[in-house]
Image (cartoon, grey):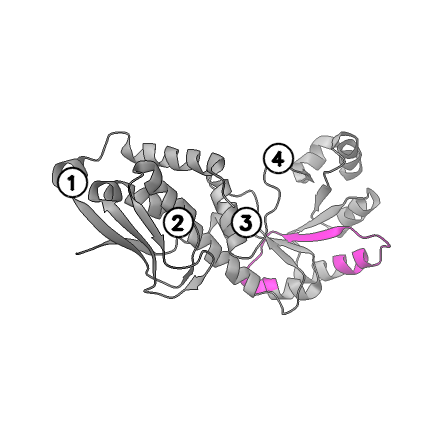
């Protein structure tokens, strides 16, 4: 769910970016009393995401604009589906068009890609597909919501959400054992400690340090199998996350190996925008 305290500042910043100097074309060409109806159309198959965002753009611009939802949020819709309808002052619809579409095209693209990755897991798999912090600055809340709409999960939201000890932290701390020991002294009891490893030797160090989660960074499928076999020998094993070099084709193999989490930066940093248009309807 996207609450207004989170959503409104994002939309307001986006509107200021487009409308700080007004809308010269609208002011020159469209009568202030002109009213219009417009429909949003899916121009390719997609997972619909961002209905509240689309509606709220126009509410903030002009409270008199009427919004109608014609397709369910999170629905897989076919090319040609009319997903939303607007009615109100033509100037308001035109001024909000690009801001609204930019946001929901981005969100629907991420939701569509996330669903594709989730669908690539083997039937019955308990492996989670998650995003990463590789998000667009200022849009993380929208992008992470879109990941959830697509059926995937979120990783830590920000640097204060959990301890994640990566390669540079290990170097700066003097090793995995020292880094985990310091983190355990400092971290809240509610926070798990994750350690990124790049070799099987580092895996052993993370196990010895009693890391709660171990991230296998850029492990091949064979090394991942060996790592999972080792972890499954433990009486109380850590969660295992696979990350780095994750392609759609690898998801099924990693799911079969049995990693707990597959984190995919591409869900947010490489998702293509969905194709949605806003078309005025002649009365």
- The residue carrying mark 3 is 265
Nearest the camera: 147 or 257? 147
Q: Nearer the viewer, residue 2 or 205?
A: 2
Asked if marks 4 and 2 touch (Cβ < 8 Å), the reply is no
Q: In terms of depth relative to the viewer, which is nearer, 240 or 105?
A: 105
The residue carrying mark 4 is: 159
Between disc 1 and disc 3, the foreground one is 1
Tell me the SS state at disc 1: loop
**Number of the front mark, 1 or 2:** 1
Q: Which mark is residue 49?
A: none
59 in relation to 106, above or below: above
Helix, strand or loop for disc 2: helix
Q: Is residue 179 visible?
A: yes
Distance of mark 4 from mark 2, alpha carbons? 27 Å
Kindly identify which numbered label has been placed on residue 104. Answer: 2
Q: Which mark is residue 33?
A: 1
Q: Position of residue 201 (x, y in %)?
A: 78, 49
Q: CA distance from mark 4 to mark 3?
A: 16 Å
In the rendered structure, which disc, 2 or 3, sits on the residue that comes first in sequence? 2
Q: If the image is split into quadrants, where does the C terminus sit?
A: bottom left
Q: Which residues are magenta?
A: 227-251
Is residue 248 magenta-colored? yes
Report, in whole angstroms, how far the alpha carbon at label 1 lies from the one at label 2. 28 Å
> Which circle, 2 or 3, is nearer the viewer?
2
Q: Earlier in the sequence, mark 4 or mark 2?
A: 2
Tell me where residue 209 sits by quadrant. top right
x, y (%) of residue 228?
75, 59
Residue at 24% of width from left, 29% of height from top? 21
């Amino acid at each position: 769910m996207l609450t207004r305290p989170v959503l409104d500042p994002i939309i307001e910043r986006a509107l200021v970016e487009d409308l700080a100097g007004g809308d010269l074309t609208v002011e020159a060409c469209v009568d202030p009393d002109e009213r219009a109806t417009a429909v949003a159309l899916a121009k390719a198959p997609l997972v619909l995401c961002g209905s509240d965002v689309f509606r709220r753009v126009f509410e903030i611009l002009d409270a008199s604009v009427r919004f109608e939802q014609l397709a369910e949020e999170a629905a897989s819709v076919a090319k040609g589906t009319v997903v939303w309808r607007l009615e109100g002052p033509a100037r308001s619809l035109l001024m909000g068009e690009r801001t609204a579409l930019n946001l929901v095209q981005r969100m629907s693209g991420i939701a569509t890609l996330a669903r594709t990755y989730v669908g690539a897991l083997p039937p019955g798999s308990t492996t989670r597909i998650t995003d990463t912090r590789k998000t667009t600055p200022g849009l993380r809340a929208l992008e992470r919501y879109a990941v959830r709409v697509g059926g995937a999960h979120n990783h830590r939201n920000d640097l204060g959400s959990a301890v994640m000890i990566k390669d540079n932290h290990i170097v700066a701390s003097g090793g995995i054992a020292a880094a985990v020991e310091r983190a355990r002294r400092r971290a809240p009891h509610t926070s798990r400690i994750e350690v990124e490893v790049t070799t099987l030797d580092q895996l052993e160090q993370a196990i010895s340090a009693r890391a709660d989660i171990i991230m296998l960074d850029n492990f091949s499928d064979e090394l991942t199998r060996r790592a999972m076999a080792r972890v499954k020998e433990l009486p109380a094993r850590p969660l295992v996350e696979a990350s780095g070099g994750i392609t759609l084709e690898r998801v099924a193999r990693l799911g079969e190996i049995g990693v707990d989490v597959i984190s995919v930066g591409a869900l947010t940093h490489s998702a293509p925008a969905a194709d949605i248009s806003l078309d005025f309807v002649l009365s």
